Amino acid sequence: MTTKFNMTRDINGYNGFGLQFSDTNFNTTLLAGVGQTLTIPSDNAYYLAVFAFEPGSTVWVADNQTASVPGGSFAATYSDLNPAARLVEAGDVLSFITSDTSIVIGVSLYAI
């Protein structure tokens, strides 16, 4: 059962970004120019995907598109640079790529 998204409250009762540990986590090592994908499980209709990237790394992430590393001029893209968290749906395919030599990444899912 996927951990439900439930933000913790501070001492005044306001929502904070404190999250409990998720029971649905993924991790991998990305190599320069080698894209990888992660298919979102179908246990729930929607998830909050929380991303963790090795400090100082550059990771491009796309949802249901192929992530791409930028070139030498501005161009339209589906890729986001080091996103913190994004709403995803069951069956979505997240695409990851880096131009760094080698980095580790993690994705934690929370049921919405």
Image (spheres, rainbow, N blue to C red):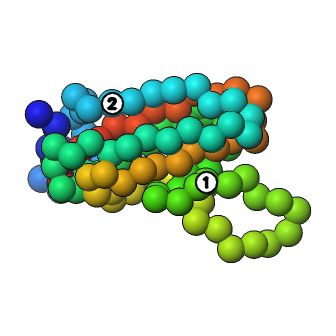
User: Distance between the Cα atoms at labels 2 and 1?
Assistant: 21 Å
Left or right: 35 in relation to 73: left
Q: Nearer the viewer, mark 2 or mark 1?
A: 1
Mark 2 element type: strand
Left or right: 20 in relation to 55: left
Mark 1 element type: loop
Residue corresponding to mark 2: 25
Q: What's the residue at 85%, 69% (across, down)?
A: 73
Camera-side residue of 2 and 67: 67
Tell me which amino acid carries mark 2. Asn
The reply to whether callout 2 and callout 1 are in contact (CB within 8 Å) is no
Left or right: 14 in relation to 98: left
Residue 62: % across, % down: 53, 56
Q: What's the residue at 42%, 50% (across, down)?
A: 93
Q: Residues within 10 Å of mark 2 (few under 14, many from 20)?
A: some
Count of numbered circles on the image: 2
Q: What's the residue at 58%, 65% (across, down)?
A: 78
Camera-side residue of 16 and 25: 25
Q: Is residue 29 above or below residue 72?
A: above
Q: What's the residue at 45%, 32% (across, down)?
A: 106
Give the quarter of the figure containing the C terminus: bottom left
Tell me which amino acid carries mark 1. Ala
Residue corresponding to mark 1: 67
Residue 43: % across, % down: 16, 43
